[in-house]
């Protein structure tokens, strides 16, 4: 019976992937046909083949790598800083509820303010270099990490703590064997949300005012009416974001092995 379930899940996964590939292939073929037939002007949308040609060109002539690596570096620097600080403050809120009452209004204000509106002030303070981009990423990703860590710990089932106490566990055992593991799924949900915000913030910052990075390449494509460069940059950013999201998912699988067991039921 268990083997049949596993086989069924594998078949379903294969068919879902096949449907995804067919959808993407159909979209690419339609774009190629629309451009080649002249139904869509090339100043608005580029064909997939021209995007690939432009990608090969900027890779081989060395234009791409400095901009792509800089954007990845900025995104990861701001994201990891926000993750460390956000999770730490979220745990602090659970240990000291007074700190949550004090800081909650400020976090709500940060969430309400559009991050792009803060960017001109950061550029005024730190210039158009890497520092302003890292700070806007921290501001945009800090709160989701904090709230998910806080709620993940706060919503742990109290019965789990009772089990540890019955078995003779101490406060330390409650924290490291119950509190932290039980809150990991909520924490990783916050990490995924924050990761998406990090890529959005870094691209918005580079599009607004920058002399390097993937946002700068996309903006240059806009200014010179090169849709191949614009769409190619968007595809590369999407690929980088998807790759980092997969890394977070793999890391979650290592720290939350029970989640894979539940999904296979």
Image (cartoon, helix red, strand yellow):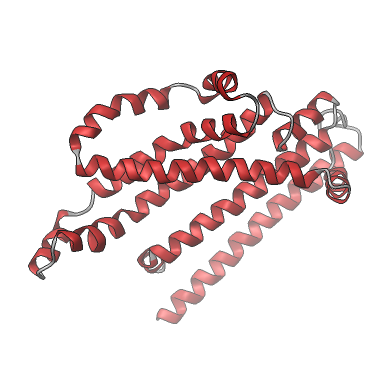
Give left or right: position of 41 versus 198: right
Residue at 15 percent across and 59 percent down: it is 171
* Residue in the image at 43% along x and 37% along y: 142
Residue 13 horizontal/vertical position (percent): 55, 65
* Left or right of 119, for residue 162: left
The quadrant where residue 112 appears: top left
Left or right position of 210 against 91: right
Q: 152 or 40: which is nearer to us?
A: 152
* Quarter residue 243 falls in: bottom right
Q: Is residue 263 above or below residue 105?
A: below
Residue 158's x, y, as percent?
15, 54
Figure label count: 0
Q: Residue furthest right?
A: 37
Kindly identify the residue that appears in the image at 81 percent across and 48 percent down. Answer: 29
When the figure is inspected, residue 200 is found, relative to residue 68, above or below; the finding is above
Image quadrant occupied by the N terminus: bottom left
| Quarter of the image that includes the C terminus | bottom left
At 50% from the left edge and 61% from the top edge, which residue is drawn? 250
Q: Nearer the viewer, residue 260 or 38?
A: 260
Q: Nearer the viewer, residue 102 or 2?
A: 102
- Location of residue 167 in the rendering, given as x and y in whole percent from the top left corner: 11, 70
Residue 96 position, x and y percent, is: 19, 40
């Amino acid at each position: 019976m268990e083997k049949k379930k596993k086989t069924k899940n594998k078949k379903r996964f294969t068919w879902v992937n096949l449907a995804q590939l067919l959808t993407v292939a159909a979209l690419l073929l339609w774009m190629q046909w629309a451009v080649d037939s002249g139904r869509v002007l090339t100043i608005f949308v580029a064909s997939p083949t021209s995007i690939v040609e432009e990608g090969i060109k900027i890779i081989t002539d060395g234009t791409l790598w400095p901009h792509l690596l800089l954007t990845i570096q900025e995104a990861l620097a701001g994201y990891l800083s926000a993750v460390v600080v956000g999770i730490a403050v979220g745990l602090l809120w659970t240990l000291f509820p007074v700190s949550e009452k004090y800081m909650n209004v400020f976090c709500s204000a940060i969430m309400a303010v559009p991050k792009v509106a803060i960017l001109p002030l950061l550029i005024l303070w730190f210039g158009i270099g890497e520092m302003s981009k890292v700070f806007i990423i921290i501001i945009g990703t800090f709160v989701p990490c904090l709230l998910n860590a806080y709620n993940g710990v706060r919503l742990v089932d109290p019965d789990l703590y009772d089990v540890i106490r019955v078995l003779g566990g101490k406060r330390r055992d409650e924290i490291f064997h119950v509190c932290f593991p039980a809150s990991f799924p909520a924490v990783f949900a916050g990490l995924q949300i924050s990761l998406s915000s990090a890529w959005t913030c870094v691209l918005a910052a580079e599009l607004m005012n920058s002399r390097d990075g993937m946002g700068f390449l996309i903006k240059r494509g806009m200014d010179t009416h090169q849709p191949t460069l614009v769409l190619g940059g968007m595809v590369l950013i999407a690929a980088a974001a998807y790759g980092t999201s997969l890394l977070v998912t793999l890391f979650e699988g290592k720290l939350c092995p029970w989640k894979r067991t539940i999904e296979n039921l």
